[in-house]
Image (cartoon, grey):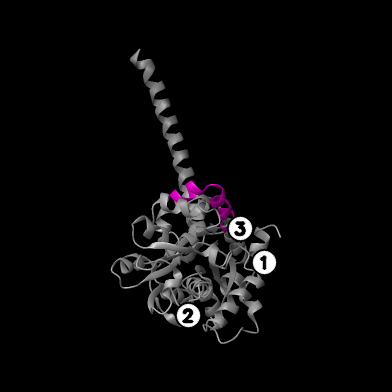
Amino acid sequence: MLNSLFPRLILIAIALALLAGCSSGTDESSASLASSKPEVKIGRLICGGHLSLAVVENMYQNDLGTFRLKTIQNHKWDDVVNDMKSGKLAGTFILSPLAMNMVREGVPAKIVMMADRNGNGFVLSTKFKSIAELKGKQAVMAVPHIYSQHHVLLYLALKQHGVPYTDVKVVGMPPRDMINSLERAEIDGFVVGEPEGNKSISLGIGWMASISPNIWEDHLDHVFLASNAFIEEHPDQAQELISALKKGGQFIETNPHEAAVMGEDYTGSSAAVFEQVLTDPPNWIDYSDMIPSDERIRAMGDVMVEMGLWKDIPTNLQDYTEQRFILKASGK
């Protein structure tokens, strides 16, 4: 009986070996295909406005046909600027006024889409009971960068509450340092992208004096700045990436809990803290309209001139954007 079973066992062993070989070959082929795709490097900071990148990287990476997405995280905006100038990045998510100023200064790049709208908080020390109380106090207010939408929002919020802009001292500070600096009383408040402001409140440090929809509703927030080389030499990759980011924004809007969990490494806060930003109030941050229209760029430029960041509006401001990719992704 053993003699009769032996040939059968040999055949089964050979068949299993062949099946294993086929399976291994398929895995190797998939890995080889993935590694053969060119890598597109996109810059980011820890920020809720960059959440659509997390969705693409975590959910849609394998759907990308022409490239593989690699995000490069920095902690300072000046490092992002240097990476763009050096050609290290194909593009980056970045502060809208900073992107506009980079183009004005000759960096070969264009704004190709908005990353989000709104999405910022104005946090004050508890020694001030209102924004109006800042009048005449020479309070120290932190913003992520002098060329930031947060600086613009601070200027407009002060104007709303009758506080002269000259009554505060504005300092640039990395967002990750703001909460500790406020707790140590080194600053009197800050305007920052969420969830850093909401995180501060959850820790009992300061209070939320305002949110950006109440200062300038639907303002230009973070944008995607792409190098001219990426736009001109790899338009198919640019289109696929922007279409995926648009899809990622739609996912965030319809699945805020899942998006908040997925983006913890991108936002630097717990999912619970950022989910509140995504949902309460519902317009605190919005990913549904990502077209950097000429009107939005001009509106930001007008305030930058009013507050002294720019001396005038560039005559070629309409050339600061390349909207065809996001228009196509939006079905327009």
Residue visible at 55% across and 77% down?
100
Residue 63 falls left or right of residue 146: right
Q: x and y percent of residue 212 in the render?
A: 52, 64
Q: Nearer the viewer, residue 53 or 27?
A: 53
Separation (CA) of disc 2 from disc 3: 40 Å
Which numbered dot is residue 243?
A: 3
Where does the image place residue 184, in percent across and percent down from the top left? Answer: 28, 68
Residue at image mark 2: 165
Q: What secondary structure is found at the residue carrying circle 3?
A: helix
Task: Give the quadrant of the C terminus.
Answer: bottom right
Pick out the residue farthest to the top: 1
Start-end of magenta stretch? 245-261
- Quadrant of residue 128 within the rendered picture: bottom left
Residue drawn 37% across and 55% down?
Answer: 202
Residue 249 belongs to the span the image colors magenta: yes
Mark 1 crowd level (few <14, some 14–19, many ≥20, 10 Å Cα): some
Foreground pick, 323 / 200: 200
Instruction: Measure the alpha-carbon separation of dots 1 and 3.
Output: 11 Å
Q: Is residue 273 left or right of residue 107?
A: left
Q: Secondary structure at mark 1?
A: helix
- Sequence-wise, the earlier of marks 2 and 3 is 2
- Residue neighbourhood size for the residue with mark 3, other residues' Cα within 10 Å, grouped as few (<14), some (14–19), many (≥20): some
Image quadrant in which the N terminus is located? top left
For the question of whether residue 165 can be seen, the reply is yes
* Mark 2 Cα-neighbour bin, 10 Å: few <14, some 14–19, many ≥20: some
Q: Secondary structure at mark 2?
A: helix
Relative to 65, residue 76 above or below = below
Q: CA distance from mark 1 to mark 2?
A: 38 Å
Query: Which numbered disc flags the more N-terminal residue, 1 or 3?
Result: 3
Image mark for residue 324: 1
